[in-house]
Image (cartoon, helix red, strand yellow):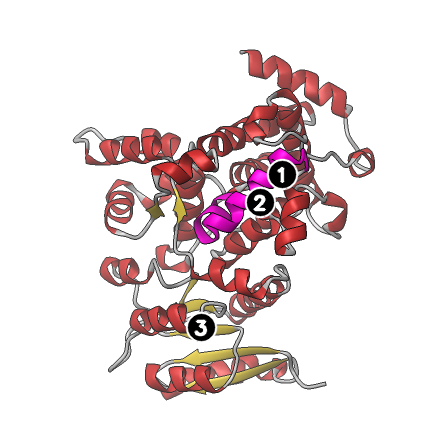
């Protein structure tokens, strides 16, 4: 069968393109690859046929990488946009923060490049709704809680700004957490480990760079006041913080390691990011979905599936995957309502988020703004090797919520 996955590589250096061709030659039967030497040729290729991914250099004569990706974002929004460049100064980074999904530095390790491309191809199949996929891929930011954003801006402008306080503020917000993790995990910043905590991210980036990014880049957007109330966005954010707190509680009961706990906590903060995506992309249509779920006493995910062919869980995971967040985080977000559908992989982050979400829904149902509690998959939870039962986890979470 002919290859079903396609990549367009763009670089003005013929030697670089030749090196990429040699590096990826073993995959030529699996992936269809095209190599062009500039932005104009790239746009012509995209107009002639469909590509899943574009990988481009930053600095090129005529049309540079950021300009090219802005065109691609507008004309071909469903294409995953990756920068592969040796240019890592602050100015160029700020120009590409918006239009690029992910970033790799030259010289690029062959396995790292292959892994990024494989991740992009996996994402392609996560959302079944092609028009929604295009809308999500066009997003450059998520709506932030206005009060939290203003608090962050005040801290950043303070003469006595503290990285500890900045990290704590960012961790209160879904949009800020997602964006800072997208940035810190890009190769531009030279961080050698995969960062899953906003607090750790700001410590690694440093005050000057965090201040520049947050004040100058296209980091967050805002829902208008009516939409904030319509979708009860503040309740979504509070619920996400409740779930992250309960994740820590369950992880402590189960004596889980720090790495697993960190991935799960991040996934908990971000698990309902898809609701914010849908509120941003499909404001009127999603308002009807939310209203129908409330009036008919149906689960929100059930109505989403019926109307959109997918749920906020897959939508959120798709965006976070585009932004390069770790697989354990995106998997926990994607399947937090249907853990048995997740397949093999890192089970515990998903299990923690699924259980904590169900507990938060039972203890504080209004935070879910649904009349139907979040579904709980008892067969999945019972398949785990645990130190305590779900009811014991819930008791521990109740005790923590009272403190």
Write down the quadrant of residue 81 in the picture.
bottom left
Question: How far, Cα to Cα, is label 1 from label 3?
Answer: 33 Å
Q: Tag 1's secondary structure?
A: helix
Q: Give the camera-side residue of 25 and 244.
A: 244
C-beta proximity under 8 Å, tags 1 and 2: yes
> Does 101 sit left or right of 394 as displayed?
left
Bin the neighbour count of mark 3 within 10 Å (Cα to Cα): few under 14, some 14-19, many 20 and up: many
The residue labelled by disc 1 is: 293
Of residues 350 and 358, the one nearer the viewer is 358
Give residue 210's position: percent from left, percent from top.
29, 44
Which mark identifies residue 221?
none
CA–CA distance between discs 1 and 2?
6 Å
What secondary structure prevails in the magenta region? helix
Q: Residue at x 68, y 46 (%)?
A: 346
Label 2: state its secondary structure: helix
Which residue lies under the disc numbered 3?
A: 76
Place residue 38 in its image quadrant. bottom left
Q: Secondary structure at mark 3?
A: loop
At x 77%, y 30%, the residue is 386
Name the disc covering residue 289, or none. 2
Q: Is residue 169 left or right of residue 4?
A: left
Viewer can see residue 6? yes
- In the image, the segment drawn in magenta is 275-298
Q: Is residue 276 magenta?
A: yes
Label 1–label 3 contact, CB within 8 A: no
Q: Residues within 10 Å of mark 2 (few under 14, many from 20)?
A: some
């Amino acid at each position: 069968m002919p290859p079903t996955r396609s990549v367009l590589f763009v670089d003005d250096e013929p030697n670089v393109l030749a090196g990429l061709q040699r590096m990826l030659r073993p995959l030529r039967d699996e992936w269809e690859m095209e190599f062009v030497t500039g932005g104009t040729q790239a746009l012509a290729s995209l107009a002639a046929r469909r590509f899943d991914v574009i990988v481009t250099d930053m600095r090129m004569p005529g049309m540079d990488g950021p300009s090219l990706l802005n065109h691609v974002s507008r004309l071909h929004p469903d294409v995953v946009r990756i920068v592969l460049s040796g240019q890592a100064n602050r100015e160029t980074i700020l120009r590409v923060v918006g239009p690029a999904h992910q970033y790799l530095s030259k010289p690029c390790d062959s396995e790292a490049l292959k892994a990024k491309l494989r991740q992009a191809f996996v994402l392609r199949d996560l959302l079944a709704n092609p028009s929604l996929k295009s809308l999500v891929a066009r997003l450059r930011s998520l709506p932030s809680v206005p009060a939290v954003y203003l608090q962050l801006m005040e801290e950043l402008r303070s003469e006595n700004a503290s990285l500890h306080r900045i990290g704590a503020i960012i961790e209160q917000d879904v949009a800020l957490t997602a964006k800072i993790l997208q940035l810190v995990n890009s190769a531009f910043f030279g961080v050698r480990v995969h960062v899953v905590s906003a607090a750790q991210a700001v410590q690694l980036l440093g005050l000057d760079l965090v201040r520049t990014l947050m004040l100058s880049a296209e980091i967050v957007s805002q829902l208008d006041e009516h939409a904030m109330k319509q979708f009860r966005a503040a309740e979504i954010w509070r619920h996400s913080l409740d779930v992250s707190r309960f994740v820590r509680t369950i992880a402590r009961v189960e004596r889980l390691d720090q790495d697993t706990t960190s991935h799960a906590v991040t996934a908990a903060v971000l698990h309902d990011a898809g609701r914010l995506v849908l509120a941003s992309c499909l404001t009127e249509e999603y308002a009807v979905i939310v209203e129908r779920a409330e009036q008919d006493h149906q689960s929100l995910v059930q109505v989403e599936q019926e109307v959109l062919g997918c749920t906020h869980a897959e939508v959120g995971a798709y965006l976070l995957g585009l932004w390069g967040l770790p697989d354990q985080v995106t998997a926990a977000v994607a399947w937090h309502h249907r853990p048995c559908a997740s397949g093999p992989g890192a089970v515990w982050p998903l299990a923690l988020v699924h259980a904590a979400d169900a507990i938060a829904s039972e203890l504080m149902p209004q935070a879910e703004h649904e009349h139907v509690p979040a579904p709980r998959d008892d067969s999945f939870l019972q398949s785990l090797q645990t130190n305590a039962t779900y009811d014991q986890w819930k008791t521990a979470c109740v005790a923590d919520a009272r403190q």
